[in-house]
């Protein structure tokens, strides 16, 4: 998606440890027009599959996933990273290790929000090692649902996440694929 790549080129920058910082438009401050454009693009990429529900993990994936759900005319469910008094009902859980935060947390979705047989599209902002996407697949499948695809805004293709997702048999569509962040230079995979 050229619009997203352009924003990454203009406003994104690298931090040590292969971290791409895009907080000015994607995951701290959000550009609603860009999120809506990404929603349209994901809807176009997954037009060939039935989607009953969109699932993401809090919090950075919510804006993009909301745009996708709105475009598809379906509901959005996000996995919560923290338990609260509101999470005392029956729930599905899976541990997910964050590449950026270097920590593992259980994420939760209440059972009442996943109905067996539903076709689920997973959307997230970044793909590094694939832990978040595969953890969400685990939760969706615990609920007896089918993962019809995984949509990622920014894929770090030089890390193992995309390979792990494809090896597990899931369809993956990414809007921008980063080839390298070496020497703090952002290089894209040429399509």
Image (cartoon, rainbow, N blue to C red):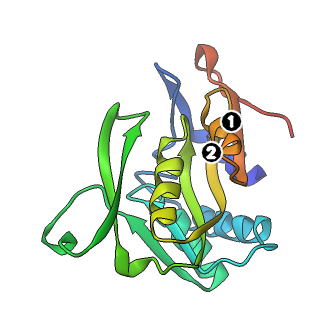
147 vs 47, nearest the viewer: 147
57 vs 180, nearest the viewer: 57
Q: Residues within 10 Å of mark 1 (few under 14, many from 20)?
A: some
Q: Which picture quadrant has residue 176?
A: top right
Secondary structure found at label 1: helix
Q: Residue at x 71, y 44 (%)?
A: 166
Residue 119 in percent (x, y) is at 62, 75
Q: Residue at x 57, y 62 (%)?
A: 122
Q: Residues within 10 Å of mark 2 (few under 14, many from 20)?
A: many
Residue 23, numbered label = none
Q: Residue at x 49, y 75 (%)?
A: 76
Residue 147 in percent (x, y) is at 62, 64
| Residue under numbered circle 2 | 154
Q: Is residue 186 above or below residue 30?
A: above
Residue 150 in percent (x, y) is at 64, 57
Q: Which picture quadrant has residue 97?
A: top left
Q: Residue at x 46, y 70 (%)?
A: 143
| Residue under numbered circle 1 | 163
Q: Is residue 56 left or right of residue 47?
A: left
Q: Are marks 1 and 2 in contact (CB under 8 Å)?
A: no
Q: Is residue 85 left or right of residue 169?
A: left
Q: Is residue 89 above or below residue 161?
A: below
């Amino acid at each position: 998606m050229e619009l997203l790549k352009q924003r990454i080129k203009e406003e994104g920058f690298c931090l040590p440890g292969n971290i791409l910082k895009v907080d000015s438009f994607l995951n701290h401050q959000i550009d609603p027009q860009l999120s809506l454009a990404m929603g349209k693009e994901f809807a176009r990429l997954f037009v060939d599959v039935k989607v009953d529900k969109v699932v993401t993990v809090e919090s950075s994936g919510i804006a993009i996933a909301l745009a996708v759900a709105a475009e598809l005319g379906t509901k959005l469910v996000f996995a919560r990273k923290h338990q609260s008094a509101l999470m005392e009902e029956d729930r599905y859980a899976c541990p997910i290790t964050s590449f950026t935060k270097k920590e593992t947390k259980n994420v939760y979705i209440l059972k009442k929000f996943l109905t067996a047989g539903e076709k689920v599209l997973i959307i997230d902002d970044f793909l590094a090692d694939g832990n978040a996407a595969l953890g969400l697949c685990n939760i969706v499948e615990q609920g007896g649902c089918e993962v019809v695809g995984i949509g990622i805004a920014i894929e770090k293709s030089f890390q193992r996440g995309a390979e792990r997702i494809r090896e597990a048999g899931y369809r993956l569509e990414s809007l921008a694929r980063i080839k390298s962040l070496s020497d703090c230079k952002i290089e894209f995979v040429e399509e």
